[in-house]
Amino acid sequence: MKRLLKRAQMKFLGGSFDEALRDYGMVLNDNPSLSEAKVGVILSDLALESEDEAKALFDYYQVIKTSSDNADEIIDQLVESIYNSKSKIHEILLEPLKEQAEYEDGIRYSDFLKHIQSRNGFREAFEDIMFSTRVILTTKKEFMSFVTQLITNDFHSMALEYLDNTAPLFGNDQEVLALYTKLKNNENSL
């Protein structure tokens, strides 16, 4: 276990965050209460999105882990604070996009949902507008719903295009990444 923990730490310090996450995860699986493994998993996951912040927190953890009984909780709170800050920034940046959407040639997702009902299905409604009108998505929930409908209704290349074009907005969001898996599974079932 100590060798695997040391290897995970070396992978983290070397910038191999996927491998570090895997190794820390294996240690955590065998030792669920081991604080160092918990922090390693949290920081490796964060590093996939924000390397500098994760490395700074890793260094901070190395300093406080010997002097504080709850060092892992401190790191967990700091990581949560980082994610909350990013979420707020994301919301602030989306507000102008919402306003701009009202002036562009497009249909709001809420209006598109009404059109789906009038056409008795997503496929028909989407085929009505796909070449002439853009669907304006202003929230993550709308995005998730729309892309899920694209996948379900076999608009695979379009779903992939939406996912690829918006990946930087959502970073390492697990719900969004799960849509890639759903798309792949749906394509394989054809």
Image: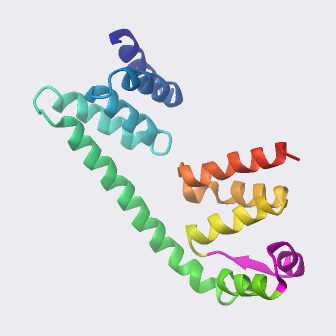
Q: Which residue lies furthest to the top in this view?
A: 3
Q: Quadrant of the N terminus?
A: top left
The picture places residue 131, in percent across and down from the top left corner, at 89, 76
Q: Indicate yes or no whether the magenta region holds residue 90.
A: no
Residue visible at 66% across and 53% down in the picture: 179
The picture places residue 137, in percent across and down from the top left corner, at 65, 75
Q: Which of 152 and 81 is in front in this view?
A: 152
77 on left or right of 174 = left
Residue visible at 84% across and 56% down in the picture: 157
Label count reads 0
Numbered range of the magenta stretch: 119-137
114 on left or right of 12 = right
Quadrant hosting residue 98: bottom right
Q: In this view, does 132 lie above or below 170?
A: below
The picture places residue 119, in percent across and down from the top left corner, at 84, 84
Q: Nearer the viewer, residue 21 or 99?
A: 21
Residue visible at 70% across and 82% down in the picture: 113
Residue visible at 60% across and 54% down in the picture: 176
- Residue 105 in sight from this viewpoint: no
How is this picture coloured? rainbow
20 on left or right of 184 = left
- Residue 19 in sight from this viewpoint: yes
The picture places residue 101, in percent across and down from the top left corner, at 65, 83
Q: Residue furthest front?
A: 120
Q: Is residue 21 above or below residue 181?
A: above
Quadrant hosting residue 143: bottom right
